[in-house]
Image (spheres, helix red, strand yellow):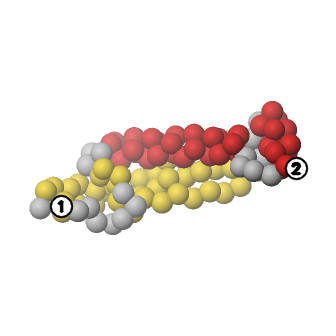
Amino acid sequence: MLITSTFDIADKTIVKTLGLVKGNTIRARHVGRDIMAGLRGIVGGELHEYTKLLAESREQALDRMIEDAEKLGADAVVGVSFSTSVMSQGAAELMAYGTAVLIEDK
């Protein structure tokens, strides 16, 4: 399945729009990660614990969006974007969304 943040795919023609597809995950912070991030905050630098958590969340949201598109029979998802929102203190949602389409070669 082709996934792109653009609304066009080089050398392909969109022949049918199937609709909005999305995938999300809600993750809570971990006390151990918070302690390590707090210590790193004192000395500065990248918060590797949170970087890893966000990367894992992004991949899970993308996988779920692709599953949603496959249920519609899509060949590709165009216009893919990510959104985040705070659900509660210490928990956040990450959502991937786009438009499922059918494509063919030009």
Label at residue 11: 1
| Residue 53 position (above or below residue 84) | above
Category of crowding for the residue at label 2, using alpha-carbon neighbours closer than 10 angstroms: few (below 14), some (14–19), many (at least 20)? few
Q: Is residue 89 visible?
A: no
Residue 85 position by quadrant: bottom right
Residue 50 in the figure: left or right of residue 103: right
Q: Nearer the viewer, residue 6 or 48?
A: 48
First reached walking from the N terminus: tag 1 or tag 2: 1
Residue drawn at point x = 26 percent, y = 61 percent:
9
Q: Amino acid at mark 1?
A: Asp
Residue that protrudes farthest toward the left in the picture: 106
* Screen quadrant of the C terminus: bottom left
Mark 2, residue position? 42
Q: Is residue 98 visible?
A: yes
Residue drawn at point x = 64 percent, y = 50 percent:
93
Q: Residue 105 appears at what percent x and percent y?
A: 13, 56
Residue drawn at point x = 28 percent, y = 66 percent:
8
Q: Residue 82 appears at what percent x and percent y?
A: 53, 57
Give the structural element (helix, strand or loop) at label 1.
Answer: loop
Residue drawn at point x = 65 percent, y = 41 percent:
53
| Residue 67 position (above or below residue 78) | above
Residue 95 in the figure: left or right of residue 69: right
Q: Amino acid at mark 2?
A: Ile
| Circle 1/circle 2 CB separation < 8 Å | no
Residue 30 position by quadrant: top right
| Mark toward the viewer: 1 or 2 | 2
Mark 1 vs mark 2, CA separation in Å: 50 Å
Residue 65 in the figure: left or right of residue 95: left
How many tags in the picture? 2
Give the structural element (helix, strand or loop) at label 2.
Answer: helix
Label at residue 66: none
| Residue 61 position (above or below residue 84) | above
